Image: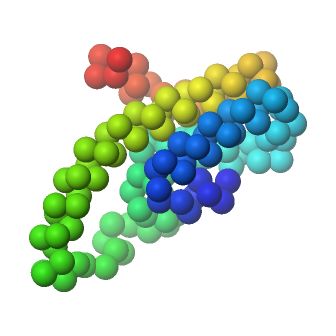
Amino acid sequence: MKVLETEENKEVIERVLENLREMCEDFGPAAFRDTMPELVENIILLLDKKAFCQTKLKKGEAEEDLEDVEDGEAEDEEEEEDDEEDDDIDHDEIIFGNVSDLILSLARAYGNEFSVSFTQIAPHLVPYTSDKYP
C-alpha cells in the first residue's frame, strides 16, 4: 500500500496493480484481510486520477503547496511535460485497465462480502461508463 501512496513512476504502479490482482486470485480474501480499507481508498484515488503517481501531490497537499520553477527551467520542463503528457495517456489507460481487473478479482474472491467495498468504489466508476471511454 505504501508503494501506491508514494511511487511516482506509473510503470511501477501498473506492475503493483498486476501483482495485487495476482495475489487476490492466488490467495483469495485472505490476501487483503487487514488492508482492504486502504486498498479501496487507493483504488478510488486511481479512478479519480488523484493518486500520487498521477498528480505528484501527497495526501493533504494542494497544488499551491508545490514550489515554483525558476524561469530558466520552465521552458525545459514544458517540453518534458509535453512528452510526458503523451506517455501519461497510455499509462493512465493501462492503470485503469489494471484497476478494473483488480476490482473484478476482488469481487470474485470476496463474493457478496465485496458489496460494501464496491458501494464505495461504484460512484467513481460511473465516469468511465460514458462514450468517452471505450
Image position of 109 (left or right of 5): right
* Quadrant in which residue 32 is drawn: top right
Residue 131 percent across, percent down from the top left: 30, 16
Residue 106 percent across, percent down from the top left: 71, 28
Q: Is residue 15 visible?
A: yes
Image position of 118 (left or right of 128): right
Q: Quadrant of the C terminus?
A: top left
Indicate whether 45 appears above or below 110. Answer: below
- Identity of the residue drawn at 40% across and 25% down: 128
- Identity of the residue drawn at 31% across and 45% down: 87
Indicate whether 107 appears above or below 7. Answer: above
- Identity of the residue drawn at 35% across and 37% down: 90
Image position of 29 (left or right of 92): right
Q: Is residue 45 visible?
A: no
* Quadrant in which residue 110 is drawn: top right
- Identity of the residue drawn at 28% across and 22% down: 132
